[in-house]
Image: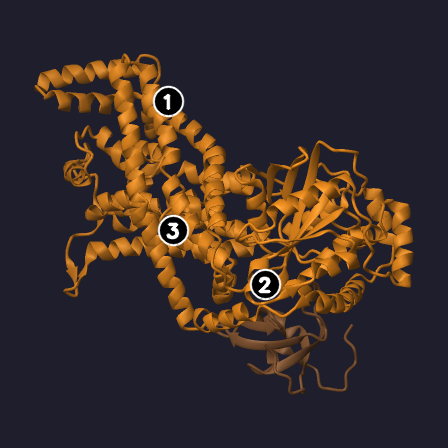
Amino acid sequence: MGKSNTQEEISFSEGDLGLPYTVASYEDKKVASKLLTMGLLPGSPIRLIRKSLFGHTFYVQSEHNFFALRKEEAATILVIKTIALEKSA
Amino acid sequence: MLLKSRPKKIKVGLIGNPNSGKSSIFNLLTGLHQKIGNFPGVTVDKKVGQFALTDGSNVELIDFPGLYSLYPNSSEERIVVNTLLDTHSEDAPDMLLYILDVTHFKKQMLLFSQLLDLGYPLVLGLNMIDIANANQMAIDSDFLKKETGVPTVALSGRTGHGIDELKAVLSEVSQSPPNTKSFYSFSRTEKEIIEKSQKIHPVSSSYHALLLAHHADWLTFLTREEKQAYGQVEFPRLHHQVEETMERFEKISPLYEKTVKGSASAGNILTKKLDRIFTNKFVGPLIFFFIMFWVFQAIYSWASYPMDAIDSLFSWCTDLLKSSMPPGYFLDFLTDGLLAGIGGVLIFIPQIAILFFIIAILEEAGYMARVVFLFDRIMKFFGLNGRSIVALISSSACAIPAIMSTRTITNWKERLTTIFVTPFMSCSARIPVYAMLIGFAFPARKIWGIFNLQGLAFMGLYVLGFLGAIFTALVFKLVYKSNQKSYLMLELPEYRPPVMRNVFYTVWEKVKTFVTEAGKIIVIISIVLWGLANFGRPGQIALAKEKAQTEAQKEGLSSSATEALISSKALEASFAGDFGKAIEPIVRPLGFDWKIGIALITSFAAREVFVGTIATIYSIESTEELSIRERLAKEKNPKTGAPVYSVATASSLLIFYVFAMMCMSTLAVVRRETNSWKWPIIQFLVMTGLAYGLSFLTYSLLA
């Protein structure tokens, strides 16, 4: 269901800590359904703030909202690097 | 969905996102006029409150569980959608009050826009206006009203701002619902689906029809034929949901930009800063354990003062009754049956109140979501939830408030597992039993010069209970199959100072629920236990008392010793005594005799009753643990002459008390929380079975 994009899509769980990404698409229906309802849409900015002790739980920010995601859940979110130099909140 | 003209009673559904401050508004509107029930057939809280409008009509406000959209993901959210789509349901509201946190306007407009299309008369409450003002945000609610047609009211759940205006607007809308505009434009495929849906189950709005087709699988009010018909309708569900949500947000964005100026960034920045500490991978868990240690201390030590007061009050009442009424069964029933039962219920209130006072503060402040973040992984491994850790730790004070605290776990399997294993944790009622028995199992000596062996053993019993809990959870995870997959995906709300009014209502609600729901069962079982200990086969007790009297006279016992001997013999002759003797063959492999058997039965009222029963059965005049221990040490097996309380028996009994489900109050609460007798019965069998097996093993190894 993702839109084709010229940039390389990576799984969010492979992304770097602290860098800004943009949600491209979702690979898992359930995860997609839930995150959409929480306002995390394709095109939304997303950033990994920190990981829990063994790295299995992600602390994630999107605009003014913070979320906790499991690594497996984050793995189903496909993202692209945000190139624009905009500073996110 | 038309309203009757001038309704006397209006049903209003209170809807909003989690963390929208919905419950603050609910508490402000209804005060103490709230009732907790369950939605039909499910164990999801249904909070209903009453209040009057200025026009004299009465509002019944139903507080629905928080949800993000009409595409639900949890069973709690499904209930809301099921109720809203089933217009013939007894819970279906006449109109809706949507509460929206203005500092998260954009995100929370999604559900509002869906409700708008669903067709219920709506009132929009713009909550957290105090925070918006403090951040110099400007909200153009007139513009919003013009664009959507929905009357809006600026509210503050913290200060109570706007509540009177809200009541006036509710009254207006209930009399003449305004014309609202539809929000979403349907695609061609959606229109086709709507047309088909309207033929299967006709409803008044197109969006309603679309949602019926989307959710037909699990909606409870559709007939089998209707579901089959919906099964024929081709519907790319997720694709449609994505498209719809995207389009809604595309329309919400310009609306947001014109309505809201500025943002509440201060709270956001503060939250980020605090979370650097609170969710830090090393410091975070340490802070949590420090908080929990403090919670444990609070339940354990603060609660002892009010608990002692309740205890004294009841013994005062008992004494008063005994001095003013003629002795007999009726007096005994009143004092030892009924009063003891009621006292047994009230004694838990301080612990419940203190635990929920602290939990509600942590929850209100936004901290509990962080606990889930910190412990999700490890708890998930054992089939539990990040929040389970709070229940497990607080249950080392008492399992009852701990089990009640699992309501915040939305995944049913994880919640059930937590409820199931929580009573393994050694609660404070086990302490007197441990204290009395540990001396028989372990000598008082030092290990490596510093550790007191008995102290270590005491800690070991706690660790055993904890291991029992998590490994049972693991087994439960493997045995109990559930098709409800577990997800985390949790919003971490901003930290906010707790609204103390909400904290108070939470404590009140928990105490009230415990007293009215579990309390009834506890009182009934206490009375039954009293009956068992005070009645026997016809004539037996009188005969036993007579014999004891003669025996005492023969041996020239003092009056208090005589009385002790009489109650001991009377208890032996009672049904409880019969039971103790009847189960002796069953408990003998564990190293227990019939006297311990009786104490096992009576301690079902509360574990610490074990000590008192043992005192009675051995006709010990004092109930002080140390003197009981001295007396027990002298107790010899009549056949072998070996001490009854050998290392093997005492160890086996200790193990039994760690694992066995010996608390009727806990079972009553489990019944209430799972809404069936099935789980408390399984829990009783599993725990007591495990206790039996391990005690048997212990006794066989040591004897």
Circles 2 and 1, Cβ within 8 Å, touching? The answer is: no
| Sequence-earlier tag: 1 or 3 | 3
Could you tell me the amino acid type at mark 2?
Ala
Q: How dense is the environment of label 2, judged by Cα within 10 Å: few (below 14), some, or many (20 and up)?
A: many
Could you tell me the amino acid type at mark 1?
Gly
| Sequence-earlier tag: 2 or 1 | 2
Circles 1 and 3, Cβ within 8 Å, touching? The answer is: no
Is residue B83 at all visible to an observer of this figure?
A: no
Please tell me whether residue A86 is drawn above or below residue B522 in the rendered image: below
In the figure, the shade used to draw chain B is orange
Subunit that carries the residue with mark 1: B
Q: What is the C-alpha distance between the residues marked 1 and 3?
A: 30 Å
Q: Are marks 1 and 3 on the same chain?
A: yes
Q: Which chain is brown?
A: A
Horizontal placement of B72 versus B177: left or right?
left
Horizontal placement of A44 versus B656: left or right?
right
Please tell me whether residue B479 is drawn above or below residue A67 in the rendered image: above
Circles 3 and 2, Cβ within 8 Å, touching? The answer is: no
Q: Which residue is mark 1?
A: B531
Which numbered disc, 3 or 2, marks the residue closer to the eye? 2
Subunit that carries the residue with mark 3: B
Question: Quadrant of the rendered structure where residue B175 is?
Answer: top right
